[in-house]
Image: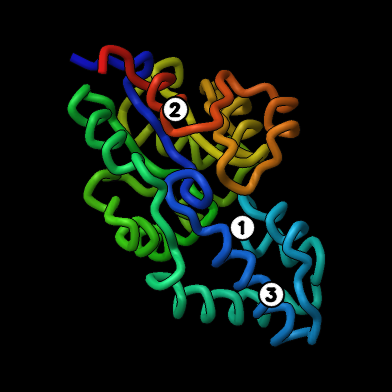
Amino acid sequence: MAVSRWRCVIWDLDGTLANTIPLIIASYDHALYTVLGIHADPVQAQGWIGQTLWDTFTERYPDHVDALVEAYVDFNLSQLERQVLRYEGMAELLTDLDSAGVRTGVATSKRRHSAERTLAAVDLGHAVPLVVGMEDTTAHKPDPAPLLLAVERLNVSRSDAVYVGDAVVDVRAAQAAGLDSIAVTWGAGIRSELAAAGPTVLVDTMTELRAALLTGC
């Protein structure tokens, strides 16, 4: 029977549970072109993933935040079911975690409704009973607030939980929350930067992630 080092696994969503990276980059490009007449640099846009839209646009285009967010969200939601892709093996991993008695949840910078639609688009909605979205906390990653709220709602101690994400802000949020962290390299983050952030575990493949989370399967 499979067992886990942790009683609880909290997941980032974009680039971790679901491959939303191409859609996010396209959404940034659409918003910037619609509002400002400029195109997004794909490499820069990928580096913005993990922050809320409001934080991203406020930092870079403070005079156009509301219009940019509206254009981004409208495009993103209109394309979501067509462009979000599954990560092979993720559904099976979540099933095996559940069989091992591991509690799971998502802590994301997305709005909860968008996060739930994303999970449904890759047939994972039933497998993740808890979603902590942007509107659930006033502070966001790399602040630990979303992760701490997820731990509280899942009724586990921080020492029994691990956060899995694909960005440096995910690792930093886990560290600030006092949680172990697993950084995956198939999402938005750059491997060398993820390694430098000091996650508890760094994995390159779904097989390595499974081995980090479960033994005996």
Q: Which residue is mark 1?
A: 52
Q: Residue 71 appears at what percent x and percent y?
A: 61, 81
Residue name at image x 49 percent, y 32 percent:
205
**Which of the two residues, 123 or 108, is positioned nearer the viewer here?**
123
How far apart, in angstroms, are the residues tagged by discs 1 and 2?
26 Å
Quick check: 193 left or right of 145? Answer: right
The secondary element bearing badge 3 is classed as helix
Residue name at image x 69 percent, y 74 percent:
29
Find residue 29 and name its label. Answer: 3
Of label 3 and label 2, which has the lower sequence position? 3
Q: Which residue is mark 2?
A: 209
Quadrant the N terminus occupies: top left
Q: Amino acid at mark 2?
A: Leu
Quadrant the C terminus occupies: top left
How far apart, in angstroms, are the residues tagged by discs 1 and 3?
16 Å
State the image quarter where residue 156 is shown. Answer: top left
